[in-house]
Image (tube, rainbow, N blue to C red):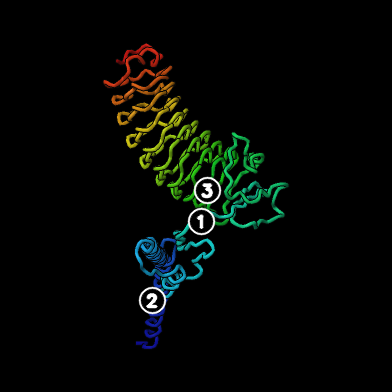
Amino acid sequence: MNFKGKMREKSGITLISLVVTIIVLLILAGVTIATLTGENGILTRAQEAEVETRGAEVEERVNLWKTEREASNYINTSVKTDTELLDEMKNDGILFEEEIDRENQTITIGNRVIDYATEVTLTDIYVALYNDGTLIFNNKDEFDTDKIIENGNFGNIKGIHYDVFYGEPLPWSDYTDQITKVEITSKIVPEYTAYWFMDCYNVTSLDLSNLNTSKVTDMTWMFSGCGISSLDLSGFDTGSVTSMDSMFARCGQLSSIDLSNFDTRNVTTMEYMFNRCTSLTSLSLSSFNTSKVTRMDGMFLDCRGLTSLDLRSFDTSNVTDMIEMFYGCSGLTSLNLSSFNTIKVTSMRTMFYGCSGLTSLDLSNFDTRNVQDYIMMFRNVTADVYIGENWNSAMTNTATGYTKDFL
């Protein structure tokens, strides 16, 4: 028996097993490392969750502090300053200095932007157009002068209420075909945004994240003719706005728009608001408060892409004008307006003209006793139209414009 020979054989087997074990461990370790540190790894997700939790806690504290400050206006209580609030959260380890923008009074944690300003005041608004087509807004006269086109520094527009149709064009009105991008590089608080982006039909990028609209009263024609394809305005504070006349008119490229947080309780006119938004296929307006609106003429004129429209939440008790309201909405197959209060409406001329796709139109609660203008109200409409007892029978022949007897 060769004892030494067998020892060498066993040692060789042991060494091979060790190498295999190490390889297996390395493979397992590699999988574990990828699982822990990859884009969707456990550690990555844990870090994202920590940031989200921290951001939510900071936002909750800021909102509570704002509430306390508001209450202090009515009761004699002492409330910490914003600096004290920030220092407190830093000391508690939920906020870091690099996340604070003290000039603009915002906190950024991950994707969450928290505004800790308590008193919103109008800011200076400087505007310039760069050679690359970027229209820049900021609250200081700080631009790269080498990039500004000739005569492209438009100065400070704070407090100026432009009205394009009454001889008061915006300083950049002659350059709208050159504008391809809009950037607001620091927080601005305007009082008026009427016509700001009107006829900027070459715009493909519109960053409005630094636009504070809480003081804006007039958004007339704001995006009219703009070439943008989608708009997320869910961050807009529109509680002070009184006019949205033609706000999105002629935005033929606009295919999606988020108005979910629009506060329209003070708006009095929505005439031609979505006029010729031909690419829109859907429009959610359930959040709209229209109790003060007096004009809805042309509101959805030529919105031919719309296939449905839910307006059951609309309060039309103060509306006097519905001329051309749904003119050319050929994509609609049914329209239920049974909730409309039309007692004050005096004009319904061509209201449904060209709604050729309609198969059902419910006007069962329409009160048309005060309607004086109803020429071609149903021109090219062959739908079943349901009316009620308050329908002014004198309208029948003139309003229809077609031979179907719906009475």
Q: Residues within 10 Å of mark 1 (few under 14, many from 20)?
A: few
Q: Residue at x 34, y 27 (%)?
A: 343
The residue wearing badge 3 is: 191
Q: Mark 2 belongs to which amino acid? A: Ser
- Residues at marks 1 and 2, CA–CA distance in whole angstroms: 75 Å
Q: Residues within 10 Å of mark 3 (few under 14, many from 20)?
A: many
Q: Nearer the viewer, mark 3 or mark 2?
A: 3
> Please, what secondary structure does the residue beneath circle 2 have?
helix
> Please, what secondary structure does the residue beneath circle 1 have?
loop
Q: Residue 80, percent across and down?
A: 41, 70
Of residues 206 and 170, the one drawn nearer to the viewer in this rendering: 170
Query: Image height check: is 342 above or below 131?
Result: above
- Residue 145 is left or right of residue 315, and the answer is right
Q: Nearer the viewer, mark 1 or mark 2?
A: 1
Q: Residue 171, percent across and down?
A: 65, 43
Q: Mark 1 belongs to which amino acid? A: Thr
The residue wearing badge 2 is: 17
Of residues 224 and 195, the one drawn nearer to the viewer in this rendering: 195
The residue wearing badge 1 is: 121
Res 47 visible:
yes
Residues tagged 1 and 2 counted as in contact (Cβ below 8 A): no
Q: Mark 3 belongs to which amino acid? A: Glu
Quarter of the image where the C terminus is located: top left
Q: Residue 81, percent across and down?
A: 44, 69
Q: Quadrant of residue 376?
A: top left
